Amino acid sequence: MSHDRIKNFPNCVPLLSFSNAILIPESSEQVTLEGLHSFSVVGEVIKNGGYVGVVQSLQCLEDTDFFTTGTLAHLTLADMTKTSITFNLKGLTRFDIQEFIKTPHNFYAAQVCYGRYPNDALVKKMDRESLLHTFQKLLSYLECSDFDVELFREHSNERLLKELIKMCPLGHIAKQHILETSALEQQSDLLRQYMEETMMGPLVAFTRH
């Protein structure tokens, strides 16, 4: 990632948190939220130039119940009613949270640093066929073999990784490990490893103790 691009990213961003979900850089996600609180958060994001930090929530923490690595995203509105708001998130780069900030509108923002992820803007490669092959085996193991894997063939690498993470039975710790892994190739390798461990079932759980 070029130094000039980093300079254009905000050092302080409002935070959107999601349970058991991550956003991969260069992937997109459409989100619908309800309630006045959501309007306040999205309004603050728009005032911030559309930049928002997407983090995974972790219920066992008592104060700021978020992981401290997330993804900077750009938000664009898609639809709005009196009770809900729909928007698109485009992942840009990962960040590390340096300090949480409680805002007057009762949501969190954070001071962030992008320096640990200089490769997020580089061309990313991964072994798509191996990843899809393992996913197909996992579907068979889960007795969901009627799902058509060919639907993923035209996806970009980032979208493919995002969709597989959503569909695989992974916990929030595993998803966070994938997010924080250095590059797309290593992220896909780790996802494949988790899928293989799922198919090993109790044997893997036993050997890890």
Image (cartoon, rainbow, N blue to C red):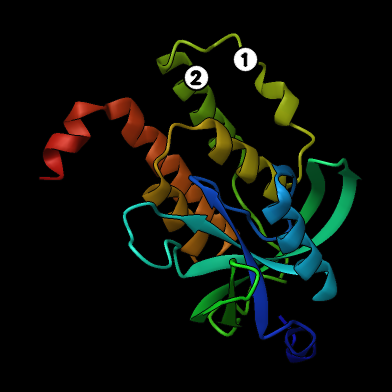
The residue that disc 2 covers is 139
Residue 133, percent across and down? Answer: 54, 29
Q: From the viewer's perspective, is residue 164 above or below residue 16?
A: above
Do the numbered discs 1 and 2 sit on residues whose CB atoms are within 8 Å? yes
Pick whichever of labels 1 and 2 is earlier in the sequence. Answer: 2
Q: Which amino acid does label 2 sit on?
A: Leu
Res. 95 image quadrant: bottom right
Q: The C terminus is located in which quarter?
A: top left
Q: Quick one: SS at disc 2?
A: helix
Residue shown at 57% from the left, 78% from the top: 110
In the visual, does 174 lie left or right of 147? left
The residue that disc 1 covers is 147
Residue shown at 67% from the left, 41% from the top: 160
Q: Distance between the residues labelled 1 and 2?
A: 8 Å
Q: From the viewer's perspective, is residue 91 above or below residue 130?
A: below
Q: Which of 129 and 114 is in front in this view?
A: 114
In the visual, does 133 lie left or right of 80? left
Label ID, residue 113: none
Q: From the viewer's perspective, is residue 11 above or below residue 63?
A: below
